Amino acid sequence: MTGGIARAAAGDVAKLDAIAARVMADYLGVRPGETVLVVVDTVTHPAIGTSLTRAAGSVGGDPVLATIAPRDHSGSEPPPAVAAAMASADVVLCAASRSLYHTRAKAEAQRAGARGVFNAPSRLEAWTIGAMTADFAAIRRQAERLADEFRRTSTVRITSPAGTDLVASIAGREPKAWLTGICRNPGEVSAYPGGEVSLPPVEGTSNGTIVWETVASDIGRIVKPVIIEVRAGRAVEVRGGREADVLRRILAEVVDADNIAEIGIGLNPAARISDEITESKKALGTVHLALGDSANEYGGLVECDVHLDGLVHRPSVHFDDRLVVDAGRHTYI
């Protein structure tokens, strides 16, 4: 082994191989002869692509590994050749450093019948410890109960000790991401680590204040909280420190990046909160609120070139008049 693989301890690679085998055989149910596309970028630890393709081949799949340049933002499109490969594959797993979930390429692949995961960790340790080691089937059972709570709700209110206080309509919106990474049927898509239920609020109905804490997409670690004032479904003011400056630049450069795009509730008890949003937003006891794209088979109407998640700690969440999360504690179970 050379490069990054050589630097990975043998024990870490063994753990990665075990998780990859579970993903391909159990969570994605790869069958003999199926085409399995694994997408990484040049930032992804090289052992990840190697292990995933090896695991797909071991259960009879026909794996293809595609390496792309890192995208400018989470939600930016992959190269056209990779988008076409996604749409022609039976199973897709993307472990790039920028999420490919909220993209037209994902939506087209989903409509073509591909199943799989369009955002997964790019760091080796995120596969071998923490959220990826959790039992996604057990989390799925809780996710299904939470999804049912979403379905019978018209209005959501999220508050937090840091100052988040957001109200939005979700009437008629179908919850997403509750598959927790178990995608065994055509067109089923999810993200890794498994562990959230989310949906896009109805356009134009979100009002109040969002406070991103700890970590956000394309920003990384947050030292000074990012305060986002929301009116009629749009971010109208951003305050804070350096991190707020980064967000303001994105909002100025990307059309519709100010759209309130997602309300997500984390469910994974093994998830660690760090400077990487992919795992952090799955942590049990957190909420993530996103800006930008809400379309592309996600259920919303705003198509945008970015999708930016930010973390909220110790949230309280009301579904209509029902308190379903109380300072991070889930009450509906």
Image: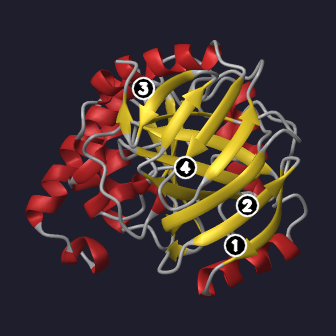
How far apart in space, not on screen, are marks 4 and 3 (Cα)? Answer: 21 Å
Q: Which residue is mark 2?
A: 76
Q: Earlier in the sequence, mark 1 or mark 3?
A: 1
Q: Which mark is residue 288?
A: 4
How far apart in space, not on screen, are marks 1 and 3 (Cα)? Answer: 29 Å
Q: Earlier in the sequence, mark 2 or mark 4?
A: 2
In the rendered view, does 320 fall on the left or right side of 231? left
Decide: marks 2, 1 in contact (CB < 8 A)?
A: yes
Q: Earlier in the sequence, mark 3 or mark 2?
A: 2
Give how far across and how far down residue 219 sits, in percent. 58, 74
How far apart in space, not on screen, are marks 1 and 4 (Cα)? Answer: 21 Å
Nearer the viewer's eye, disc 2 or disc 4? 4
Identify which amino acid the numbered label 4 is placed on. Answer: His
Give how far across and how far down residue 292 sits, in percent. 77, 54
In the rendered view, does 21 fall on the left or right side of 122? left
Looking at the image, which residue is at 61% across and 80% down?
243
Is the C terminus in the top left, top right, bottom left or bottom right quadrant?
A: top left
Q: Which mark is residue 108?
A: none
Categorize mark 3 by other alpha carbons within 10 Å: few (<14), some (14-19), many (20+).
many
Secondary element type, mark 1: loop
How far apart in space, not on screen, are marks 2 and 4 (Cα)? Answer: 20 Å
